[in-house]
Amino acid sequence: MRVMEGRWNKMSLWMTIRWGSVSPAVNGTSSPRENGVAKKSPPLGPPISPRSSGSSSSTPQARKDEKPATPNSKTPTPTSSGSSSMKPVGKAAPLPGVGAYPPGYPLPDAANAAAAAAAAAVAAGAAGAPYLPPAPGAGFPRPPAHPAGAPPPTSLDMHVRAPSLHALQGGKPAYSFHVSGDGQLAPVPFPPDALLGPGIPRHARQINTLHHGEVVCAVTISNPTKYVYTGGKGCVKVWDISQPGSKSPVSQLDCLQRDSYIRSVKLLPDGRTLIVGGEASTLSIWDLAAPTPRIKAELTSAAPACYALAISPDSKVCFSCCSDGNIAVWDLHNQTLVRQFQGHTDGASCIDISPDGTKLWTGGLDNTVRSWDLREGRQLQQHDFTSQIFSLGYCPTGDWLAVGMESSNVEVLHVTKPDKYQLHLHESCVLSLKFASAGKWFVSTGKDNLLNAWRTPYGASIFQSKESSSVLSCDISADDKYIVTGSGDKKATVYEVIY
């Protein structure tokens, strides 16, 4: 039983409700868009020739932040928290069908949650600075403020800088690094058009605040853009954002147990069905086309919680990331469990599916990212890291997978080559991540209160917004014109993307 409780407590590191506000560092006033490279640097050359797919690599770490261990979690190696290796999986036999889950384990009580929150990992104040544990009752240590006399950032287009060992011309620290197949790490000289051209945002403007009333652990936006769904404790609230200044939800969907937090909400492409998962063994399927939204089905597994959901492009299948590490595959027409993908040795925390519906990507608390062949029902690849995986997203237009980690890194992996990019602007756990439909940019959010927008794949910083609490969830509208975030201060924020 202690082992099972430990698994839950690992997940509590990014579990919403347990976090207070952690202010990000402001270690410089110059824009990080230049990435520490002189403005006249040539664009990034062709990628290094990949090695064979059977090779593995170890990525040097560009940070020396040290973090206290999280209770009941694997202690990340401070100098290699972003390292990874890729293990292609051979022609193994197809995964078995439905199998028995291990016995359930209790949900965390207040004491466990408080202990996990009190020991949540935070970054050191500056590169190379030793971490000093806070005194009892004290808040997390904060890095030095921006230099005296420098104007504080005031707009959503502000830029702050993560500490880095790599300071190039002019002493400007880099935050984006290319990692070759043999593990060589180098700052990325961004192409001249990194932040130019159609489909690349200039900044984002906050246009609405949706006061949910509980910590918002999950959000999604309808297509076409009209409704925002916010998941909190025991319910999903529906907001009509087409009405300027709307302050009240148009409906409330009570689901799971009253004290159970919603962890994921997904709309089917037709917008008529909503699937809800969270701290319960049951997924709720809502009929939104009825005169009054109603539950039309419930899917029950033996796992005590669902951490994330994905829907196949044809709307026939739902995939749920279970707290026991399994990926449950549900037939939505017959409302039955048809398969379990088994491989993660700890909770499966995040998931995304390729646009053609043939491959699935999952991340877990076992420090791995795995890809699955949905036609053959087997695992294809495994990427090993030294940090727990909290979020990921597959680029809808290319061969890139962005991964958000407990270590504060964002890594952008090429799905067929060993080359990748490593991004260092977050100061704490990266809790959610989403690609724009055009594939040219993506956003990530974190426990450091930040919303970061990045250029695909090399991670040039497009814009950054600081919220007032941990940003736990995010979504981008199908037309790439709006971003919605859910935060620990019981609200969702709607941004308009300015091009």
Image (spheres, rainbow, N blue to C red):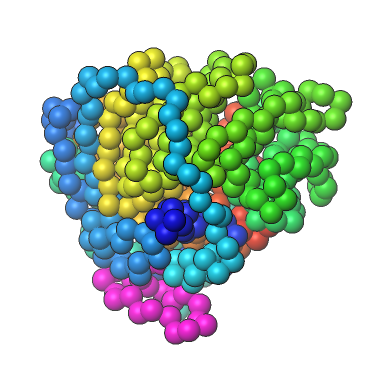
Quadrant in which the C terminus appears: top right
Res 131 → quadrant = bottom left
Q: Residue drawn 65% across and 56% down? A: 215
- Towards the viewer: 318 or 353: 318
Q: Residue drawn 21% across and 41% down? A: 85
Residue 114 visible to an observer of this rendering: yes
Q: Position of residue 163 (x, y in %)?
A: 33, 64
Q: Is residue 140 covered in magenta?
A: yes
Compared with residue 424, is residue 251 higher up or lower down, i.e. above or below? above
Q: How many marks?
A: 0
Q: Residue drawn 69% across and 27% down? A: 297
Q: Is residue 126 covered in magenta?
A: yes
Q: Position of residue 442 (x, y in %)?
A: 47, 39
- Towards the viewer: 77 or 497: 77
- State which region is magenta: 121-145
Compared with residue 472, is residue 116 higher up or lower down, i.e. above or below? below
- Asked if residue 295 lies left or right of residue 425, the reply is right
- Towards the viewer: 36 or 184: 184
Q: Residue drawn 72% across and 41% down? A: 255
Q: Position of residue 235 (x, y in %)?
A: 72, 45
Q: Position of residue 47 (x, y in %)?
A: 20, 33
Residue 481 visible to an observer of this rendering: no
| Residue reaching furthest to the bottom | 135
Main structural element of the magenta stretch: helix, strand or loop?
loop
- Asked if residue 107 lies left or right of residue 7, the reply is right
| Residue reaching furthest to the right | 291
Quadrant in which the N terminus appears: bottom left
